[in-house]
Image: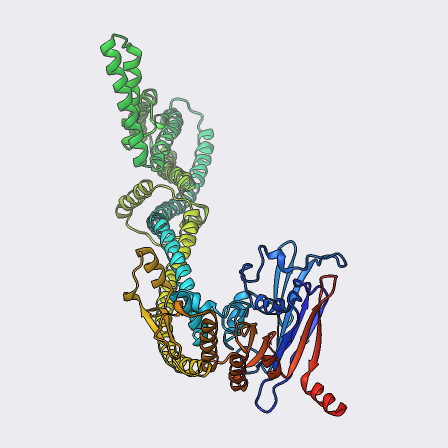
Amino acid sequence: MYLKELSLQGFKTFAKATTLRFPDPKESRHAITAIVGPNGSGKSNIADAIRWVLGEQSIKTLRGKTSEDVIFSGSDGKTRSGFAEVTLTFADVSGIEGIEFSELTVSRRLYRDGESLYEVNGQSARLIDIQMLLAQANVGQKSYSVVGQGQVDHILAASPEERKSFFDDATGVKPLQLKRHQSLLKIHRTEENLTQAELLVQELTPRLTTLRRLTKRLGEREEIEAELRRVSISFYGSLWHTHSSELSREKEILKTIEAELQTEREILSAEKIKFENIEKEEKTEDNGVYGLTILQRRYDELQEKRESAREELFELKKNAEVSAAQEISWTPLPFQKILEAVEGLFKRLTIIKSKLKSGELSEKDIDDTLDESEELLGRLKKPTPEAKKIDAATLQKQKELEEEDAKIVAELTTVRQDMNTTAEAANTEKKTFIALQHRLLIAQEKVHAEEEKANTHKVEEARLEARLEALGKEMKDVLPKDVIENVRAVKEKADIDELHPRLLSLRQKLEQIGGIDQETVKEYEETKTRHEFLENQIADLVSALYDTRKLVKELDGDIQKQSSVAFREIQKHFEHYFKILFQGGMASLEEIMASEMEDDEEKQESREAERSDSVIGIDISATPPGKRLKSINLLSGGERALTSIALLCAVMATNPSPFVILDEVDAALDEANTWRFAKIVEELRPKTQFILITHNRATMHTADVLYGISMQNDGVSRVLSVKLEDVAKGDAMRR
């Protein structure tokens, strides 16, 4: 991977679109590009542009006060720009995970309203995505990839903890640290989500318990209703079947009796006709036949009178049976109603007691309370409706009719005896008439007997019809329509005495449970589903926490291992390059452990959360040749610059960055040390592409491409490029 192209527009002094192209690597060696120009021409702005597009957020690092300072502010000859944009193009990036193209383009644009955009290959991206992507290639705005003007000494001036951050970049553990940081953020978010989910579960659990209990009661109610439905069908079906069967049987019996009665009536009618014909033949008024005729008429009158009384008595009995049959419509008062009635009486008695004490009690209060008590007692007992009772007048009338019937029967008996006596005394000539009369009497008795039997069965039929009617009304009041249909379809008889207490018990249980809204079931299911979802979410979060913490632990191990190996390598190279630059001397690096640092508790906790191991700082020791100094604070400016360059080169040798921008790092070096620095750069160029911003001729001599930066009176930086090899060829031709 190498930097192929840099494009700027509107960034600081580069108002116009400007492009710097860098040569491809040749013969396993990267080209060295030198950027030169007078002071104030804008050379360092190129380093700032690269640092900015890589994600630098510190405006101070970019030598500005506000973010708007990176946008061209205008000049006398040029209006200000509305935005700043920098684009880096990398080639040979196939080795980077997640990149399927041979080239990678990273762009950043900033508008004056503060809107900032990042793009990767023309697609919008987040800064973290760019950082993670470039970190895989050891490229980043805070790493040694870009060393700005005056920053070469920063590593020496920095605190041990700041050096530790620099070495993290240098040792290549930055991608691992970014992953660790993201994992720690994930742990924090997961813990917050877990806490929230647990709080929601705590809030839902009591409501879920209540809904579960109500739903269970609803289930019990449904079971009771189903059982009540079954018992009701069996109970009322048995009653309906029994009464219907009895009614059908009574109708069949009555039909047979009426047929027999019709036959007897036909026989009686025929005998009467014969008797009337013979009677017409009798002319003698004083004979026995005449006497019999008078007795027969009296007998007929008594029979008609008895028939009328019996019909009236039949109607009275029929009405009495119908009234009695209506007792089947009685249903027990519900338990809840009983409680309400008793509570009402209790309240009324309390009021009476209070009025009794105050002297305000009236006779009406006592009478009203007695009436309510009698009403409640009457509703609690198995009632016989008052409207259906046989009153005293009806009973007296029935008694009178029965007494009258008895008198008529007695008189009929006497008349019959007289008719028999007369018949025995009749002469032989009249025996035929008497016999006929006797047959007529027997026929009349048979008709009366059949009529009596028919009346009895009519009363029973009326009683059964009344019971069926009352039963139907009761079923209509207490049973659903579909149950009534099932009731009428019952063909088997059950034990009524066993079913009735069961029926009352089930009704009482329903009263005690009360009504439950069906929406409760829906709410329960919704709450249960949400509760189960939260519990599953909690389980997933707990599992994610375990996995993420395990990952952090693994990353800590990898970081520790990689850092330790890289640190030893850097230390070796640091000593090597220090001796090259100083022509001798000693230099070393030392890790500072957490136990060696004295700090307040808050910083300790903060550091513990961020570091991957017990190393929290890096200390540097340097002793130039001929001196006994070890502390870098005692080094001269030139010695500090050489030490910084030696350490920087040691880092690049250990973990090469694809490209490095060095902004006047050689400014403090003399000519001899510049050549030594150039030698080191030449040694490192096989693995690193160098872009050197310099004024030093020795450094320029090392470069393959030379970019000149100039600025005219309009305050806009311009770029001129020269290939030094072409210049050398031209000089040779001229010579």
Look at 25% across and 7% down and name the residue there: 359
Q: How many marks?
A: 0
User: Residue reaching furthest front?
Assistant: 626
Above or below for 110 versus 403: below
Q: Nearer the viewer, residue 426 or 224?
A: 224
Measured as percent of width and height from the top left, residue 636 is found at 44, 70
Please state if 28 lies on the left or on the right of 560 as rendered.
right
Residue 171 lies in quadrant? bottom left
Q: How is the image coloured?
A: rainbow
Q: Nearer the viewer, residue 397 or 174?
A: 174
Residue 77 lies in quadrant? bottom right
Measured as percent of width and height from the top left, residue 601 is found at 30, 56
Measured as percent of width and height from the top left, residue 21 is found at 67, 78
Please state if 323 lies on the left or on the right of 91 as rendered.
left
Residue 614 appears in the figure: no
Measured as percent of width and height from the top left, residue 231 is found at 33, 49
Residue 364 lies in quadrant? top left
Residue 256 appears in the figure: yes
Look at 67% across and 67% down and name the residue there: 41
Rendered-image quadrant of the C terminus: bottom right
